[in-house]
Amino acid sequence: MKDNESGKRTKNGQASRGSRAEARRATEESILKAAERVFAEAGFGGATMQLIADVAGLPKANLHYYFETKESLYRRVVERIFNIWLEAADVFDEASGPAEGIGAYIDAKMEISRNHPNGSKVWASEVMHGAPVIQDYLETTLRDWTEGRAVIIRRWIAEGKMAEVDPHHLLYMLWATTQHYADFSHQIETLNGGAPLSDAQWEEAKTCVKSIVLRGIGVS
Amino acid sequence: MKDNESGKRTKNGQASRGSRAEARRATEESILKAAERVFAEAGFGGATMQLIADVAGLPKANLHYYFETKESLYRRVVERIFNIWLEAADVFDEASGPAEGIGAYIDAKMEISRNHPNGSKVWASEVMHGAPVIQDYLETTLRDWTEGRAVIIRRWIAEGKMAEVDPHHLLYMLWATTQHYADFSHQIETLNGGAPLSDAQWEEAKTCVKSIVLRGIGVS
DNA sequence: TCTTTTTCTGACCGTATGGTCAGGTTGAGT
DNA sequence: ACTCAACCTGACCATACGGTCAGAAAAAGA
């Protein structure tokens, strides 16, 4: 599992960036990317290993060399977006108050919705169908994270830094609103005349969401 | 296609409530209900006609007597929830201002999330996967509806009845937040200790959402 | 009662899917 | 140059799926 950055060369002279382990990581990465897209577009049941293989540019059998089953591949895809969200939530803790913390959290989650719409969709699909694969995450990591953030919010309320709102429902609203831009991107595009949101429109969206939420909790 | 409310009796003396047409409607209803649940739990690709038939308590072949294909059955399920939402939106128009209109709209949509969680999930799944089946609805009915409501919101803003926010992003926030309670009900239940929201908790949710949104747009 | 129409169903079919495997290829280690 | 483990792949398999159909059963109409 150790890194091997020796940068050796193969017979044909092509630079093999980092030997075997590196190549493996690259292949796994391309499979995960393809899987994320296919699972997002077709759902777990509708996705086929053949299509994932085609998108990744690999024979189907090779796919099973890297990932034993469809479900294990799917699980990795779901874990991925979950970890991205968790990391983004750090901004929440480092903040000194709700205006800064929640504002930054909205910004971060909106950015993720823009850059990882497929991951968000796969997660949404998984939870909607009863989280058959990642139920354990919900009961451990997510629950802990949520309670931790609820404590922070309650402290801000106690310190008079924001209005008295239920922390859980506030978090649900943040999740729902930000992820909506990823999960329902197709609907939003249709209502936007068939075009994806432009840079300016994304800025507008972030500003608008922050404006309503922050004013809604008595900040700014 | 005409109604037949004659209420005739069959040979065995059992009251046949409303003859053939009535029985047909009842069977279709039970199939649609079963389909809604199965599609919500497994997605379109994951759902099987066999399972829908089992849930409805019918042989699979009989299902195809009432609905030609899996897709036509699915379409009917999606159209259903869409029409329910459209009807609920009437409260928006009849209102004299944002506090009343948007407040009532939130209440109505939260009620639907509680009473038709499966329909909401099927809709979400359909849109997330690019709306392959109901794209026409998005481009006609939904677009018209949205633009109509945007006009009303802009008028309220012009009349100084609420803060200046982009109507579209406000609507997205309303949709996202209210539907989240249906689409992510499993996640919410898990974070609620594994139990569905109680009556009181639903009231709390509605109050909390309305409170944040209405204050967020400068009302109340 | 006899005929006709609608409703129902077990058995069946072609296809596509997730997964397997034997055997080939490659390239790092020596 | 040789070895061996890691990597790759076409061909294959059992299963499950959506959909069909001939014909039974039931109800309506005469």
Image (spheres, coloured by chain):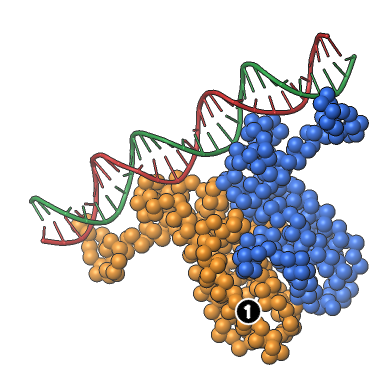
Chain colours: A blue, B orange, C green, D red
Asked whether residue A217 appears in the rendered view, the answer is: no
Q: Residue at x 75, y 47 (%)?
A: A80
Q: Neighbour class for label 1 at 10 Å: few (<14), some, many (≥20)?
A: some
Asked whether residue B21 appears in the rendered view, the answer is: yes
Q: Residue at x 59, y 44 (%)?
A: A47
Q: Nearer the viewer, residue B75 or A17?
A: A17
Q: Residue at x 71, y 33 (%)?
A: A66
Up the image or down, B126 lies above or below B168; here it is above
Direction from residue B61 to residue A127 in the image, left or right: right
Circle 1: element type: helix
Q: Which residue is mark 1?
A: B150
Residue C1 at x, y = what percent? Answer: 8, 51
Direction from residue A95 to residue B62 in the image, left or right: left
Residue D21 at x, y = what percent? Answer: 30, 41
Residue B140 at x, y = what percent? Answer: 53, 70
Up the image or down, B43 lies above or below B170; here it is above
Name, please, the residue furthest toward the front: A13
Q: Quadrant of residue B188?
A: bottom right
Direction from residue B153 to residue B86 in the image, left or right: left
Residue A69 at x, y = what percent? Answer: 65, 35
Q: Quadrant of residue D6?
A: top right
